[in-house]
Image: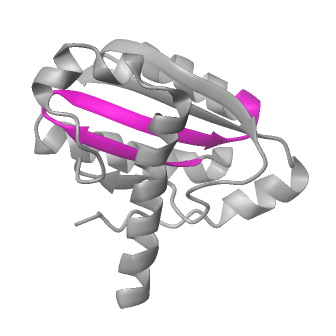
Amino acid sequence: MLDPGYSNPYARIMEAQSPMLTQLIYMSQPFGYDGATLSGILSSARRNNPRLGITGALICRHDIYLQLLEGPPQSVDTLFQSISSDDRHLAVTLLHRADVDHRLFPEWAMLHDPAHSWHWSPDEVASGAITEASPEVLRQVFQQAAADTSVAARQI
């Protein structure tokens, strides 16, 4: 079940001020993955992302973080640099970065999806399946998470 992340009311305001959006997808290996570490990451994202105009989703399990960030280009790039130096992440790898005209997660400061929206096994991840995936395949993973979120929101 997707975690009901906090809404990002500032995303639309920031978008109106700066219509250019960047979408960035990266992967990393969790360092010391447990519930407390994950809660800290999500809490920090949900607290800080709204004021930066950033929305997105984090798909995770014990062996991987796969995250999509979207928002103003400078904010996204600055946040990615911060994540790259965060000691809770190992082997941070940029998978895709592109300018886009709309957000996949406009209402989510940070959606948490505990790896239900994709199908790579730990062995496939270790063998490089994600780094070899095309940008389209990576976006489809997050599009599925966004679709699941829409369905869950309609059921509440």
Q: Is residue 141 or residue 113 the one in the foreground?
A: 141
Give percent across and percent down for residue 2.
29, 64
Q: Is residue 23 above or below residue 12?
A: above
Where is residue 128, by image quadrant?
top left
Give percent across and percent down for residue 155.
35, 89
Q: Magenta segment, which residues?
A: 55-74
Q: From this viewpoint, is residue 88 visible?
A: no
Q: From this viewpoint, is residue 139 visible?
A: yes
Number of callouts: 0
Q: Looking at the figure, which quarter contains the N terminus?
A: bottom left
Give percent across and percent down for residue 65.
30, 32
Determine the residue positioned at 32% across, 44% down. 59
Q: Is residue 36 above or below residue 103?
A: above
Q: Is residue 63 or residue 129 the one in the foreground?
A: 129
Q: Is residue 146 left or right of residue 49?
A: left
Q: Is residue 126 or residue 49 the one in the foreground?
A: 126
> Is residue 35 magenta-colored?
no
Q: Is residue 154 above or below residue 46?
A: below
Determine the residue positioned at 59% across, 55% down. 104
Q: Is residue 151 or residue 153 the one in the foreground?
A: 151
Q: Looking at the figure, which quarter contains the C terminus?
A: bottom left
Give percent across and percent down for residue 134.
49, 26
Determine the residue positioned at 41% across, 57% down. 144
Where is residue 102, by image quadrant?
bottom right
> Is residue 73 magenta-colored?
yes
Determine the residue positioned at 56% across, 28% down. 79
Q: Is residue 121 left or right of residue 22?
A: left
Where is residue 135, by image quadrant?
top right
Color style of the picture: one colour
The majority secondary structure of the magenta stretch comes to strand
